[in-house]
Image (cartoon, helix red, strand yellow):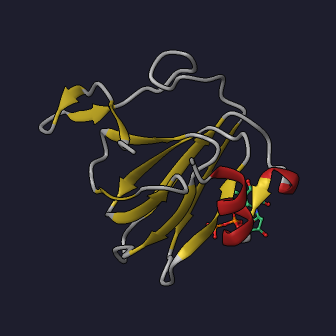
Amino acid sequence: MEAKLINFKEIGNPSTGILIAIEQMKEVPFEIKRVYYLFDCHIRRGFHAHKKLKQVAIAINGSCKILLDDGTNKEIVLLNKKNQGLFIEGGTWREMYDFSADCVLMVIADSLYDEQDYIRDYQEFINFYRKS
Ligand code: TYD
């Protein structure tokens, strides 16, 4: 698998301040239904896949790592840029870890929260998604 990183356009510069705008179907390839963010994270999190949910994760402050697993291949992505987002499609197991103390991880998603869309059991995920 190949991590899909999106580079956002910066408006301004460090001497005046920088602004990044994210619009649906433009900077992110879906309609935006939900935004949430995590901070003060000290433990490895995630340990789930989504069946359909599409997301873009952005470390808007600090850094963290995200392990992506499509059932066949695994990839570790370091998120440490305010102007970069990681697109995560359905069918991807993810674990987030190595959060810096100042990490704020913002996630933009194409659906409202729905526990029915989660697969929280790794073996169940593998049974669904391992490519033969
Ligand atoms: P979860 O997605 O399991 O977090 P992580 O993958 O970061 O470990 O969600 C943690 C808790 O927060 C869980 O009880 C569901 C709740 N939650 C919401 O209520 N709304 C949301 O949009 C999200 C993402 C989670």
| Residue lying furthest right | 116
Residue drawn 75% across the image and 60% down it: 119
Quarter holding ligand 1: bottom right
Residue drawn 65% across the image and 51% down it: 129
| Residue lying furthest top | 26
Q: Horizontal and vertical percent for residue 22? A: 47, 27
- Out of 59 and 77, give the one closest to the viewer: 77
Quarter occupied by residue 61? bottom left
| Residue lying furthest front | 132
Q: Horizontal and vertical percent for residue 92? A: 57, 51
Q: Is residue 1 left or right of residue 117?
A: left
Residue drawn 57% across the image and 20% down it: 24
Image quadrant holding the N terminus, namely top left
Q: Horizontal and vertical percent for residue 126? A: 65, 62
Q: Is residue 89 left or right of residue 26?
A: right
- Out of 72 and 108, give the one closest to the viewer: 72
| Residue lying furthest bottom | 43
Q: Horizontal and vertical percent for residue 31? A: 66, 23
126 w.r.t. 4: above or below: below
Residue drawn 39% across the image and 66% down it: 103
- Out of 12 and 16, give the one closest to the viewer: 12
